[in-house]
DNA sequence: ACGCCCTATT
């Protein structure tokens, strides 16, 4: 019905409307109009000009008026507030919302609650809302439902303080709170990263007698664990066990994940025996976590065994566990096995996803098979899986590593074309790619550009920059970046220290190098095979063979596994000094360890035979 | 609800 037509209708039916009518009469008139005209309420100027909060309330709470008519009336007011002198106020909202609840129109009711929560001019402390709700004389069940929903709405809108006010109000007034509503709050506050508040709220849930589920407990434990506070997560679990909540497989998985991340196999094993004791069976995610843990410490064979065990136990492998084990085989260079697993996955009717292709593409990139990479990239797109930023970064890195700069740049262009914004990985990949091509200036320029392009440099970015300065022999700048990165909230890691130590070692500044090694240990970072290799190489080059041998011995004691580069450094050091017996002993040891020597080892050894022992 | 893909150092 058009505005004009309705105007006419109202005039015909109610010819005697005047502004002098009482509120009650006007409300009655409008209500009748709403009922008679089957709605599409447009209205007359005279009616509109008289509209106020009281009249609106009378209409909305008119029991003779169907809820649907109230809703239409309200929507009309919202849509046309340019025509009326009155905007629905909080009271109107509350009255309508209560009616909607009574009529079980929950979704619409929630929509209007959302308006109350988010519109600035409707915002009101919970006590204000409460008194309006009371005024309407609603039954307790409706009131409880309304506050429960209001609590959820505040949580959804990340209005945590307001949500807590509602929570407290409900608590103080004996209104029962649904655990599922509390979950909404827990998940929302966890999502914004406020783990302390998450825990704090959980405590309040426990205190106020909300029925705690293992789900809410696990959510909080996961929040703590993801922030690296596995001990507190563990304590919370133990505490709740004392209150009769039984952890389930999700709880255990969360803790296993956290313990694995900090390489705490003791913690992992403790969880596994607890599961065993409590009769909680591991699921495919448990196995995925264990497989990742083993693989990341190089025990890929054991990981494969575990994978077999899982299948034997009848636990269905899914695309996650396949992707994980494919990825680890790729990373250890076993592409044959990776592709076999990929076939197995599809034969089982599982659908590979972007992660699965990402793992494979990474493996093929690392193997330098860029033609095969292109095939995989095309294949996945044929299957309707879109390229993502991770894969583009991976492929770009692959091209850089093979020195195919044009192809690498093509990836960059493709990235833009696909609407991806270069992320910190992209920048780091390009910077290190340029470094490897000896284009240091461009790499530095790119790294300096990051902040103004809105990408915060991370530890890897700073490490790359430090490495460049070290290679240039510019220790002043290297140190400046090194000390400065912490002020920007990025902690140096073992690789950062290694880059610096390598810089100093190569320039013969062994004293500085050792000082840095001590510093990293003091800060809880253990020297790795790179640290040792770098120092050994430095000592050898500058004739301190016995220092190098001492380091080599220490490396074994610390259970660090030397690589072919480590052996090459020390063997060539010994050879240069004519200590060929020792050199050959180490050569045998290297072969024994299953390492494949490269040509430089042989020429060193040959050289040792005709060098005078000094 | 938990678990899968990318970057830096010898």
Image (cartoon, coloured by chain):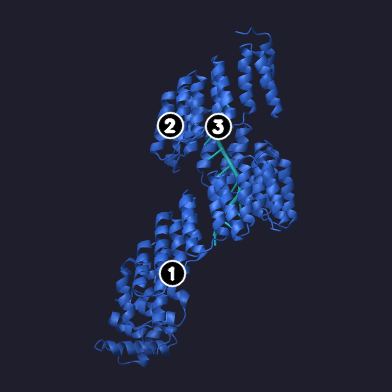
Chain colours: A blue, B cyan
Q: Quadrant of the C terminus of chain A?
A: top right
Q: Image check: A51 left or right of A257? A: left
Q: Nearer the viewer, residue B3 or A359?
A: B3
Residue at 47% from the left image edge and 54% from the top image edge: A235
**Residues under numbered marks 3 and 1 in contact, where contact means CB atoms less than 8 Å apart:** no
A414 in relation to A181, above or below: above
**Residue A509, percent from left and from top:** 47, 19
**Residue A310, percent from left and from top:** 69, 54
- Between the C-alphas of marks 1 and 2, the distance is 50 Å
Q: Nearer the viewer, residue A138 or A596?
A: A596
Are marks 1 and 2 in one subunit?
yes
Mark 2 crowd level (few <14, some 14–19, many ≥20, 10 Å Cα): many
Q: Nearer the viewer, residue A57 or A272?
A: A272
- Numbered disc in front, either 2 or 3: 3
**Residue A460, percent from left and from top:** 50, 37
Q: Residue furthest left?
A: A20
Chain containing the residue with disc 1: A
Residue where numbered disc 1 is placed: A210
Q: Image check: A277 left or right of A188? A: right
Chain containing the residue with disc 3: A
Q: Image check: A544 left or right of A476? A: right
Q: Image check: A365 left or right of A472? A: right
Mark 3 crowd level (few <14, some 14–19, many ≥20, 10 Å Cα): some
Residue at 64% from the left image edge and 52% from the top image edge: A287
**Residues under numbered marks 1 and 2 in contact, where contact means CB atoms less than 8 Å apart:** no
Residue where numbered disc 2 is placed: A482
- Between the C-alphas of marks 3 and 1, the distance is 50 Å
Residue where numbered disc 3 is placed: A528
Q: Work out whether residue A89 can be spotted.
A: no
**Residue A291, percent from left and from top:** 64, 48
């Amino acid at each position: 019905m058009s505005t004009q037509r309705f105007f006419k209708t109202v005039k015909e039916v109610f010819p005697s409307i005047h502004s002098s009518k009482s509120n009650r009469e006007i409300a009655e008139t409008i209500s009748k109009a709403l009922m008679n005209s089957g709605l599409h309420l447009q209205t007359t100027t005279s009616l509109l000009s008289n509209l106020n909060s009281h009249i609106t309330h009378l209409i909305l709470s008119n029991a003779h008026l169907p809820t649907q008519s109230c809703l239409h009336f309200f929507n009309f007011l919202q849509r046309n507030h340019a025509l009326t002198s009155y905007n629905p106020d909080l009271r109107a909202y509350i009255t309508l919302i209560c009616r909607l609840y009574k009529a079980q129109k929950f979704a619409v009711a929630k929509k209007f609650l959302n308006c109350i929560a988010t519109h600035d001019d409707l915002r009101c402390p919970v006590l204000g809302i409460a008194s309006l709700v009371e005024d309407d004389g609603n039954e307790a069940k409706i009131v409880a439902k309304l506050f429960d929903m209001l609590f959820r709405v505040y949580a959804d809108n990340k209005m945590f303080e307001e949500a807590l006010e509602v929570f407290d109000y409900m608590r103080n007034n004996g209104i029962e709170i649904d655990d599922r509503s509390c979950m909404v709050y827990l998940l929302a506050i966890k999502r914004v990263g406020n783990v302390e508040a998450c825990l704090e709220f959980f405590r309040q849930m426990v205190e106020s007698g909300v029925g705690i589920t293992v789900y809410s407990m696990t959510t909080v434990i996961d929040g703590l664990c993801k922030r690296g506070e596995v001990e507190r997560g563990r304590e919370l679990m133990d505490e709740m066990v004392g209150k009769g909540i039984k952890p389930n497989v999700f709880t255990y998985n969360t803790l296993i994940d956290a313990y694995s991340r900090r390489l705490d196999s003791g913690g992992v094993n403790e969880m596994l025996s607890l599961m065993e004791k409590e009769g909680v069976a591991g699921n495919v995610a448990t196995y995925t976590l264990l497989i990742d843990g083993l693989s990341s410490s190089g025990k890929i064979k054991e990981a494969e065994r575990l994978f077999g065990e899982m299948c034997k136990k009848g636990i269905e492998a899914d695309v996650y566990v396949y992707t994980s084990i494919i990825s680890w085989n790729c990373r250890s260079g076993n592409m044959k096995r990776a592709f076999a697993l990929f076939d197995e996955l599809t034969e089982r009717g599982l659908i590979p996803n972007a992660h699965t292709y990402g793992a494979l593409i990474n493996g093929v990139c690392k193997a330098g098979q860029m033609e095969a990479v292109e095939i995989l990239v095309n294949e996945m797109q044929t299957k309707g899986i879109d390229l993502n930023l991770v894969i583009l970064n991976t492929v770009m890195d692959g091209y850089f590593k093979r020195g195919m700069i044009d192809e690498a740049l093509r990836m960059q262009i493709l990235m833009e074309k696909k609407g991806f914004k270069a992320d910190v990985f992209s920048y780091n990949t390009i910077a290190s790619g340029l470094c490897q091509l000896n284009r240091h200036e461009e790499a530095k320029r790119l790294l300096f550009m990051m902040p103004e392009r809105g990408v915060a440099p991370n530890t890897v970015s700073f490490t790359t920059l430090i490495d460049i300065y070290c290679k240039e022999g510019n220790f002043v700048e290297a140190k400046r970046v090194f000390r400065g990165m912490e002020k920007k909230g990025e902690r140096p890691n073992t690789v950062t220290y290694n880059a610096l130590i390598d810089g100093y070692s190569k320039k013969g500044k062994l004293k500085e190098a050792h000082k840095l090694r001590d510093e990293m240990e003091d800060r809880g970072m253990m020297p790795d095979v790179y640290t040792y290799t770098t120092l050994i190489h430095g000592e050898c080059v500058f004739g301190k063979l016995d220092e190098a041998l001492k380091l080599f011995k220490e490396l074994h004691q610390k259970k660090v596994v030397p690589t072919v580069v480590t052996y090459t450094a020390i063997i060539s050091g010994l050879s240069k000094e004519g200590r060929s017996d020792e050199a050959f002993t180490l050569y045998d040891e290297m072969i024994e360890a299953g390492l494949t020597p490269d040509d430089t080892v042989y020429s060193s050894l040959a050289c040792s035979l005709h060098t005078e022992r000094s």
